[in-house]
Amino acid sequence: MPMKAIELLAPAKDFACGKAAVDHGADAVYIGGPVFGARAAAGNPLADIARLADYSHRYRAKVYLTLNTILFDHELEDARNLARQAWDAGVDALIIQDMGLLELDLPPLPLIASTQMHNLDGGHIRFLEKVGFQRAILARELSLEEIRSIREQTTIELEAFVHGSLCVSYSGRCYLSYTLGGRSANRGNCGQPCRLPWDLEDAHGRKILANRHVLSLKDMDRSEHLSQLIDAGVTAFKIEGRLKDIAYVKNITSLYRLRLDALIEGRPDLKRASSGTTTVSFSPHAAKTFSRGSTAYFLRDQDDDIWSPDTSKSIGEAIGRVKRGSQNWFTLCEGHEKIHAGDGLCYFDSRRELKGLQVVKVVEGRVQVHTPPVDLKPGTTVYRNHDHRFLKQLEGTAAERTVGVCLRLCETPDGFALEAIDEDGVRAAVRHAVPKLAAEKPEQALETVRKQLSRLGESMFRLAALDIQTPAYFLRASELNRMRRDLIAALEENRRLSYERPMRGHEPQPTARYPVIHLDASYNVSNEAARMFYRRHGVQTISECFDLHTPVSGEVVMTTRHCLRRCLHACVRETSPVRLALPLAIVNGQRRFRLDFDCRLCRMLVVLD
């Protein structure tokens, strides 16, 4: 049975983040181009994407372009041109949402179905496989059992999010930002109203919760469930964060690289999807770069503590409880984490409002802060959301990624040959005409050869073995260094030339039937090419895309598995549910949205009132 290649996929806001992701162990990087990338604030020139592809391919790591907004008719030609330019830039696959792209003359790049395409069940994903997609990015809300079911029904590659910020809505089915301010999430311009404070009211207008972040979720962390996900059929593990900074990319990529390497080492059925070995100079810690708390998010039945109602900001790691305090200092109870000058701390006061502190110094357990803390009582949990020393460790070079290589030195009629073969089987050789002078001190001469040929520190290679097949000749260090440099340059060039970019696989099946024949607005059909695609595959009626009309009362603007009735212990499945006067509503200023509950499918609908 062939080994399964396990891919770690990291985000890239820009070239620097993408390079850092590769250096810290990513097997692939996803990045947005100048337009249509679902993150308007994370666009990149194609020249930078070409640079990133060239660098990534040195390690057999891949670069995926996010071309995953919905498109209007006048944008289709620009999208097609962007896909062509991405092909020329060396991109390895396109992540897309809009089916209209499949009606265009695209380059032969593999297609990855964005999670915004409602990749929730085997029927839809089986269809994607039939029409030419190589991979589907699964909905974040799926359980292990649901992923297994999809795996049994398809052979398409399955990619799953494992870490990062969570959209409260099913991806692609949120129109709250567009409704409130005309900023469309499906066009890459989400204003994140789900992170705002809201009032929760019952049918009589009574406030159940006031000024709380009722739609804000904790962050996903599935680092303890990677083996289960692999067994369920996932082979690509995705870190969220194309708007996150480079410290986050370094930290979280390193964390998952270490976890996956440990799994792969213990399982002969698995292999890494790219080349090289990564070593980092720090100990990765998920809560030290951005964290609202963590959740496995419906991966298991017991994942019900998913929301973060007190704040939508990063709180970091809990470091201890307050013992006592006065003026501008406090102490923590025994066993707390070490604190240093420059750290940023935070805590929730008695009103559950988040307060921040900056550490000036720590003297004999006393933590002195810049501004006197307000309402910081004994027993209060203190969090660190800026670890000054940890972040300093991440500055500059914090990781090294190297490819193993075996070298062999042998004689030629007029001198010497130095040959190399790396861990991927790529070869190179150089020949140098050098006088052969017998060494007066053989052992010393051989040691010089070993020392000079082993100096690969500034290259991308790591010496795995050195085979000296010559007698002890006198060779100058300068000659040995020249041979080594020429060989490494040749090997790097041969790696570049031998990289095989993936191509789109099987031909699409023109008779494949879409599993649904009536498409409502949530299918986000926004151009005539997409309408042609769906009609060609059996769809009979197609409703107008939400982005093409003004929202009206009664329209569903968000569909989510986050259920406020469940959070308030008012779920009908509870043994003794709390009774609430329905319907509930969320209110922010003058904007009011009714909450409907689809208990059969365990979903909450946010409806424009």
Image (cartoon, grey):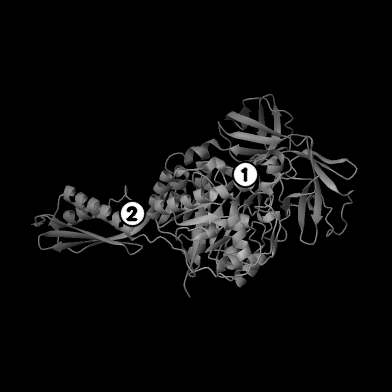
Disc 1 versus disc 2: distance between alpha carbons?
35 Å
Q: Can residue 143 be seen by looking at this rendering?
A: yes
Give the percent coordinates (x, y) of residue 386: 58, 37
Q: Which mark is residue 291?
A: 1
Give the percent coordinates (x, y) of residue 96: 55, 55
Lateral position of residue 516 relative to residue 24, left or right: right
Estimate how packed mark 2 is, as few (under 14), some (14 to 19) or many (20 or more) residues with alpha carbons within 10 Å: many
Estimate how packed mark 1 is, as few (under 14), some (14 to 19) or many (20 or more) residues with alpha carbons within 10 Å: many
Q: What residue appears at the point 46 percent right and 39 percent down from the top-left corner?
A: 395
Q: Which mark is residue 338?
A: none
Q: Nearer the viewer, residue 156 or 374?
A: 156
Which element type, helix, strand or loop, lies under badge 1? Answer: loop
Q: What residue appears at the point 10 percent right and 63 percent down from the top-left corner?
A: 413
- Which of the 4 quarters of the picture holds residue 209? top right
Which element type, helix, strand or loop, lies under badge 2? Answer: strand
Amino acid at circle 2: Phe
Task: Indicate whether 442 appears above or below 206.
Answer: below
Residue that mark 2 sits on: 461
